[in-house]
Each structure stands twice: as C-alpha cells, then as structure tokens.
Amino acid sequence: MRLRQLVIAAETLDTADTLRAVLGLGEPFPDPGVAAFGLVNAVFALGDQFLEVVGPTTDDAPARRFIQRGGEGGYMAIFETGDIAGFRGRVDALGIRRVWEIDLDDIAATHLHPADLGAAIVSVDQPVPAGAWRWGGPDWQANSVPGAFTGAAFESLDPARLAGRWADALGLSTEAEGETVTIPLEGGQLRFSPGPADRLTVFETALPDPDAALSRASDMGLERDRNRIRVTGVDLVLSRL
C-alpha cells in the first residue's frame, strides 16, 4: 500500500488557487468525471503523488454533507495497491461496504463507506501499469513539481480503534507509542492521535524548499506556526525533500 493522493473538501476552488500559490504547484487537472459525485475539482501533481481539492456543486453531494457536518478539511485518502482483488476480498470479509468502484483498462478503484472506517473516505486503486495515475490527467508528468507526501495524520476520540479499522481494511499493521498509533506505509505513515472528532487533519508534505513555501504563506496572511501552514481545515506540515 502506497499513499498516492490526498483530498481536501472546500466550499470553492479558491482553496486550490491558495495551495498552488503557497506550494508552487503546476497546472491543475480538472477531472470532468467528478461531476457524477456533484463536484468540481483541481488535481495537482507533487512528484508522482497528488493533491486534490473538491468543491460541491449540488446540495446532496457527499462533500456538501461532509462540510455541513464538520467543516471544510481533509476528505479522502487514495492508496495504490498491486492486488485490488485481494483488497476487495479482504474488506468484504470484514463487512466493510464498497460504495463505488470502477474497472477500466488503465485503473481499477474501490471506495469504502466512510461510516465503516471513519475520519475520511478511503479509496484503494490499482493502476496499469503500476505507477500510472489516470486521476492526475493525461499530462500529469509534465505538470508535476518536485515534492512528496510522507504521510497523513488523523484525530479521534479513540485513535487506537480508528487506526485498527484502517489497518484492517488496508491489510497493514499498527504501532503504538503512548496515545498515538501509526500505520507504516511504503514511503510514509499514517498517524492517529487523540482529538475531538474523527478527522483527517494533517498532510505531511516534503518540498525542495519548504522555507520558501512558509514565506509565501506569511505573505498571503495564512495561519502558520514554524513548519505548519493552515489551509482550509488542513495543516500542511512541511519538511525538506
């Protein structure tokens, strides 16, 4: 399992403009396919991973309900697997509902019901060939800038329980240190810590020049603290690539 994409749900795509300016991102891809979910979006390539902003366009869009429940913020995490059939069999055996899936020549994807895991929507996808990524658009390599997601962090009233559900679904193990539980991934980790609600709160982001991004955030009047920038309900925790 490798983290390939993190998603923010926002009222408008102004958030995408803010992220592009702060992080020095390239041209975004607007995926027309998300209209089926009542959304518009912008997808940015960061290395061979992706940062997406979605905005609801209908009152009954799942992202609209997400924002109404808890506000704008971390909405979805998408992972790459080399065994989508094994993943689907595992979640079926666990009684975790599959709410949407597709099987195309270049990618197969499965979304899990967020109520069965908590904190965010999980999608596990198998691109063909490995490392490809349909959701980034046909020109994502040309539009990519250097960078990487090294992990994501979650808050929960019961972080051990939330981490256990995610680990079971992903077929991974957990490691505990005090009240924080981690799930090691290829090239990163997921961290679960105590908080007031189940939420995806942090995108851990490595950049060639994080100081430049922090300076741009200050110039734009964004909330920041040392290596942390607050953007639309998500903390971007920056490190050096």
Image (spheres, rainbow, N blue to C red):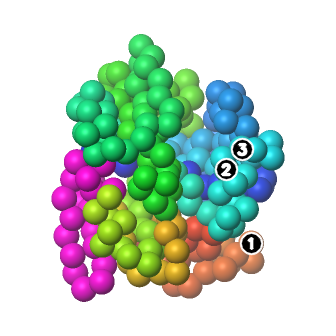
Mark 2 Cα shell of 10 Å, populated few (<14), some (14-19), many (≥20):
many
Q: Position of residue 153 (x, y in %)?
A: 42, 68
Residue 178 is situated, as x and y percent measured from the top left of the image, at 25, 86
Of the numbered discs 3 and 1, the one sitting upstream in the chain is 3
Residue 76 relative to residue 84: left or right: right
Residue at 51%, 32% in the rendered image: 100
Q: Amino acid at mark 1?
A: Met
Mark pair 3, 2: CA separation = 5 Å
Q: In the image, what residue occupies the spot 35% across and 21% down?
A: 128
* Residue 146 seen from this side: no
Q: Are marks 3 and 2 in contact (CB under 8 Å)?
A: yes
> What is the C-alpha distance between the residues marked 2 and 1?
27 Å
Q: Which residue is mark 3?
A: 61
Disc with the residue nearer the chain's start (2 vs 1): 2
Vertical placement of residue 204 versus 83, above or below? below
Whole-percent x and y of residue 114?
49, 52
Q: Is residue 1 magenta?
A: no
Q: Amino acid at mark 3?
A: Ala
The amino acid marked with disc number 2 is Ala
**Label 1: how many Cα within 10 Å (few below 14, some 14–19, many 20+):** few
Note whether 77 is above or below 228 in the view shown.
above
